[in-house]
Amino acid sequence: MTRRPRRNHSPAFKAKVALAAVKGEKTLAELAAQFDVHANVIKTWRDQLLEGAAGIFGEGKPEAPPPVDVKELHAKIGELTLTNDFLAGALTKAGLLSAKR
């Protein structure tokens, strides 16, 4: 018996097969014959569909990032600018940095 090459199924096809499995109108063996996919693969797709279904209705919504305080950011920028200027002056006086930038 020869093995057939590995197939990549589209998400739409997987959803179609998984929905058919969830409906339960046919057995996994019947669906496997109909869609030419192994029954274990159909069971995996069905389980993935059922696990991910809760996220569709809002349980898996990511939280919004916390609001940004612009005043605090401007204060930090000013602080870092002062530090950079101080260090540049100190390095210039020490002869480790040229006066030109």
Image (cartoon, rainbow, N blue to C red):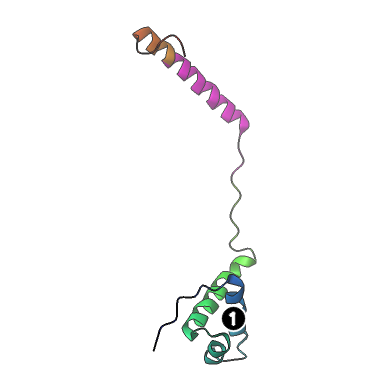
Q: Which residue is painted at 60% across and 37% down in the image? A: 68
- Would you say residue 48 sits in the magenta stretch? no
In the rendered image, residue 38, in percent from the top left (x then y), is placed at 48, 84
- Would you say residue 72 sits in the magenta stretch? yes
Of all residues shown, which one is farthest toward the front?
Answer: 2
Label 1: few (<14), some (14–19) or many (≥20) C-alpha neighbours in 10 Å: many
Q: Is residue 11 above or below residue 33?
A: above
Which range is magenta? 66-87
User: Which residue is denoted by mark 1 in the rendering?
Assistant: 17
Considering depth in this image, is 20 or 10 the residue closer to the camera?
A: 10
Q: Is residue 76 above or below residue 85?
A: below
Marks counted in the figure total: 1
In the rendered image, residue 28, in percent from the top left (x then y), is placed at 53, 89
Q: Is residue 50 above or below residue 31?
A: above
Q: Is residue 50 above or below residue 91?
A: below
Which element type, helix, strand or loop, lies under badge 1?
helix
Q: Quadrant of residue 57?
A: bottom right
Q: Which residue is painted at 61% across and 84% down in the image? A: 20
Q: Which residue is painted at 54% across and 74% down in the image? A: 9
Q: Quadrant of the N terminus?
A: bottom left
Q: Which residue is painted at 49% across and 86% down in the image? A: 39
Which amino acid type corresponds to the residue marked 1 in the rendered image?
Answer: Val
Q: Is residue 46 left or right of residue 1?
A: right
In the rendered image, residue 35, in percent from the top left (x then y), is placed at 57, 85
Q: Main secondary structure of the magenta part?
A: helix
Q: Quadrant of residue 61?
A: bottom right
